[in-house]
Image: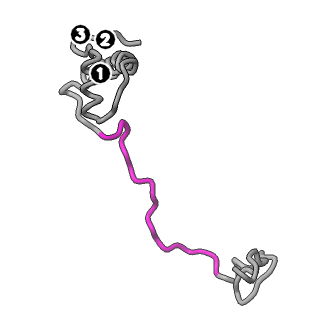
Amino acid sequence: MAQTSPETRLSADDVARLGRLARIELSPDELDRLAPQLEVILDSVARVQEVAVADIAPTSHPLPLRNVFRADEVAPSLDAEAALAGAPAVEDDRFRVPRILGEEQ
């Protein structure tokens, strides 16, 4: 568990005030339990802020992003006769497949 700094010490009164601001009713046991947990969160945020120094440019992603889509270009492909050549069943220049839905569909 992280050591809390004096700046991030929270009392039960601090937590009660936060609870009122958030309109959350907290019991005395919850106030005592939540204060140290919130201190850990505040200390973690403070440690992250120590790393974010001025010479590091802000970024939204740690790795450079690049477009991985290929160009949408027309290319030669099979004609209908060649595509249907290996089909087990053909009807009206289309693949014939068994019906999977009933008549009521």
Helix, strand or loop status at disc 2:
loop
Q: CA distance from mark 1 to mark 2?
A: 8 Å
Circles 3 and 1, Cβ within 8 Å, touching? The answer is no
Circles 3 and 2, Cβ within 8 Å, touching? The answer is yes
- State yes or no: residue 64 in magenta: yes
Residue 72's place in the image compared with 88, above or below, is above
Please give the range of residues in magenta: 60-79
Q: Residue at x 45, y 58 (%)?
A: 69
- The answer, for residue 85, to whether it is visible in the render is no
Q: Main secondary structure of the magenta part?
A: loop
Q: Which residue is mark 3?
A: 6
**Rendered image quadrant of residue 101:** bottom right
Query: Which of the numbered marks, if any, corresponds to residue 4?
Result: 2
Q: What amino acid does circle 2 point to? A: Thr
Residue 4's place in the image compared with 58, above or below, is above
Q: How many marks?
A: 3
Circles 1 and 2, Cβ within 8 Å, touching? The answer is yes
Q: What amino acid does circle 1 point to? A: Leu
Q: Earlier in the sequence, mark 3 or mark 1?
A: 3
Q: How far across and how far down the image is residue 82, in percent?
A: 70, 79
Q: What amino acid does circle 3 point to? A: Pro
